[in-house]
């Protein structure tokens, strides 16, 4: 995949798409954070930090299903393939994020 530059207009469109999609992931997801960057190959990428509710994070049998739904919903909402973006997802529970107090995550 080729690297693309994400312009201001695209960033605004992506922000609006994430804002629309995030509520559809509740109650399992309590917050969606993201940043843009390049991956190890130099491709333009979007890095998501997903905060799961403690209840969702504690349900091991459902975690795979929840993660897949989050990834599909967000990738479809922002059209990652059309934009030529690589997407990466990291998940944390509310408790884990509160304990780590990492303001720069993801």
Image (cartoon, helix red, strand yellow):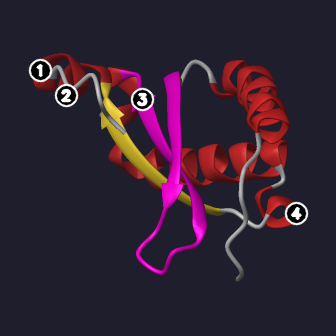
Name which quarter of the figure residue 91 lies in.
top left
Name which quarter of the figure residue 49 lies in.
top left
Identify the mark nearer the N-term, 1 or 3.
3
Identify the mark nearer the N-term, 4 or 2.
4
Q: Are marks 3 and 2 in contact (CB under 8 Å)?
A: no
Q: Which residue is mark 4?
A: 82
Alpha carbon distance from label 1 to label 2: 5 Å
Q: Which residue is mark 3?
A: 52
> How many residues crowd around disc 4 within 10 Å: few (fewer than 14), some, or many (20 or more)?
few
Secondary structure under the numbered disc 1 in the rendered image: helix
Identify the mark nearer the N-term, 3 or 4.
3
| Numbered disc in front, either 1 or 3 | 1
Alpha carbon distance from label 1 to label 4: 37 Å
Over which residues does the magenta segment extend?
Answer: 30-53
Q: Are marks 1 and 2 in contact (CB under 8 Å)?
A: yes
Q: Are marks 3 and 4 in contact (CB under 8 Å)?
A: no
- How far across and down, in percent of the image, does residue 30 sit? 49, 18
Q: Which residue is mark 1?
A: 99
| Numbered disc in front, either 1 or 4 | 4
> How many residues crowd around disc 1 within 10 Å: few (fewer than 14), some, or many (20 or more)?
few
Residue drawn at 70 percent across, 43 percent down:
74
- How far across and down, in percent of the image, does residue 15 sit? 72, 28
The reply to whether the magenta stretch includes residue 38 is yes
Q: Which residue is mark 2?
A: 96
């Amino acid at each position: 995949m080729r690297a693309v530059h994400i312009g201001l207009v695209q960033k605004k469109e992506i922000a609006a798409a994430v804002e629309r999609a995030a509520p559809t992931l509740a109650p399992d997801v309590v917050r969606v954070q993201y940043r843009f960057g390049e991956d190890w190959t130099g491709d333009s990428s979007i890095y998501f930090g997903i905060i799961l509710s403690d209840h969702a994070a504690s349900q091991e049998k459902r975690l795979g299903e929840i993660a897949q739904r989050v990834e599909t919903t967000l990738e479809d909402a922002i059209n990652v393939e059309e934009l030529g973006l690589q997407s990466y997802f990291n998940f944390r529970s509310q408790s884990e994020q509160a304990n780590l107090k990492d303001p720069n995550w993801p």
